[in-house]
Image (cartoon, grey):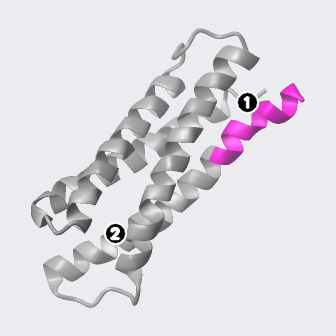
Amino acid sequence: MDSFLAYLHPAMATVALLLSWVVFRQGFHQRTQRLRRVPAPPNSYARHVKLGPWNVALLIASALGGLGSAVLLRGWKPLATFHGKLGVLSAILFGLMWWLGRALAAGDKSGANRHGVLGVFSLFAAGLAGLLGISLLP
């Protein structure tokens, strides 16, 4: 059972990262539409607003699962690796991005650039954390 649980966090994180890329692309289409006045793909905004919060929740759950896996299954100290620290940082960045996204969806467009920049940084941090995590697999 422990071997199954050891791979649960990486599997969930992989799904979350793939979904993050999809949500990022939809958001990038919105930025292109806003700045260049080019039409975004149909329903891109609706999918971005619908999938974004679910993706952030999955990423935060994955970060918490990684912490739990490290402490409970492996007996490591919390955040003993750069992978763990970067994973938690990316989860925090995703949470901040979600918070800004809520304001955007409510009509306050002043944080659109900050939301996008946070999206790029959080996706980069999560991807790097994922690459670093490969070496920690059992």
Question: On the picture, is 59 further left or further right than 34?
Answer: right
The residue pinned by badge 2 equals 27
Question: On the picture, is 91 further left or further right than 79?
Answer: left
Q: Can residue 130 be seen here?
A: no
Q: Is residue 22 above or below residue 121?
A: below
What residue is rendered at 58% in x and 39% in y?
Answer: 62
What residue is rendered at 37% in x and 36% in y?
Answer: 92
Question: On the picture, is 121 further left or further right than 37?
Answer: right
- The question of residue 22 being in magenta is answered with no
Q: Is residue 98 above or below residue 75?
A: below
Q: Residue 137 has which mark? A: 1
The dominant secondary structure in magenta is: helix
Say whether marks 2 and 1 touch (CB < 8 Å).
Answer: no
What residue is rendered at 39% in x and 80% in y?
Answer: 44
| Residues at marks 2 and 1, CA–CA distance in whole angstroms | 32 Å
**Type of amino acid at the residue the image marks with label 2:** Gly
**The N terminus lies in which quarter of the figure?**
top right
Question: On the picture, is 46 further left or further right than 75?
Answer: left
User: For mark 2, does the 10 Å Cα neighbourhood hold few (<14), some (14 to 19), or many (20 or more) residues?
Assistant: many
- Judging from the image, what secondary structure is the residue with disc 2 in? helix
